[in-house]
Amino acid sequence: MPKVRLSGTSAAKHGCSGASVNYGGCPSDAEEWISQACPIVGSYGGSDNSPLGWRAGERLDRLLTELDVPHDIKVYPGAGHGFMNDHDPGDQTLLLRFLARVSGTEYDEAATRDARRRTIEFFDCDLKGT
């Protein structure tokens, strides 16, 4: 069975068949190892100005393109950090509610639907070799 990793930055180190990252960073040393990465699908919020935001997504897309690593990276205009988080605030700890407020985390249904569709299609095609 193929190994799947849900972190783009560790995709090169674990022999995975595919990786997914949602609003995750692109480390400063990525140029040194990302050429060995498995195929990656990623989704970023265009209004996310954190280090895990759209700049990281654009950088990851550029590096993967330059190094010819199969990928599908998309930045969603208007979506913020954590745009796929539709958790009930009552189910979150006080710390998580605070961090969500500080980071501007806000659920974006349209972006979430598209990101989930792309991720499923990416793994379906990549892992089946189609």
Image: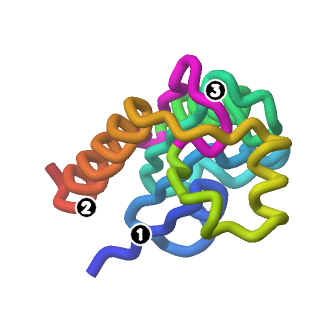
Specify the amino acid type for callout 3: Glu
Identify the residue shown where x is 81% and y is 36%. 50
Indicate the secondary structure of the residue bearing disc 1.
strand
Main SS class of the magenta portion in the image: loop
Q: Position of residue 19 (x, y in %)?
A: 47, 58
Task: Classify residue 94 as left or right of residue 45.
Answer: right
Identify the residue shown where x is 20% and y is 50%. 125
Residue 90 — which label? Answer: none
Q: Position of residue 112 (x, y in %)?
A: 42, 40
Q: Position of residue 4 (x, y in %)?
A: 41, 69
Q: Mark 2 to mark 3: distance in Å?
A: 24 Å
Q: Which residue is mark 1?
A: 4
Q: Which residue is mark 2?
A: 127
Dot 1, crowdedness within 10 Å: few (<14), some or many (≥20)?
Answer: some
Specify the amino acid type for callout 1: Val
Query: In this figure, what is the number of numbered marks?
Result: 3
Q: Which residues are magenta?
A: 69-83
Q: Who is closer to the viewer here, 72 or 69?
A: 72
Q: Is residue 7 above or below residue 119?
A: below
Q: Earlier in the sequence, mark 2 or mark 3?
A: 3
Q: Earlier in the sequence, mark 1 or mark 3?
A: 1
Q: Residue furthest top?
A: 77
Q: Which residue is mark 3?
A: 58
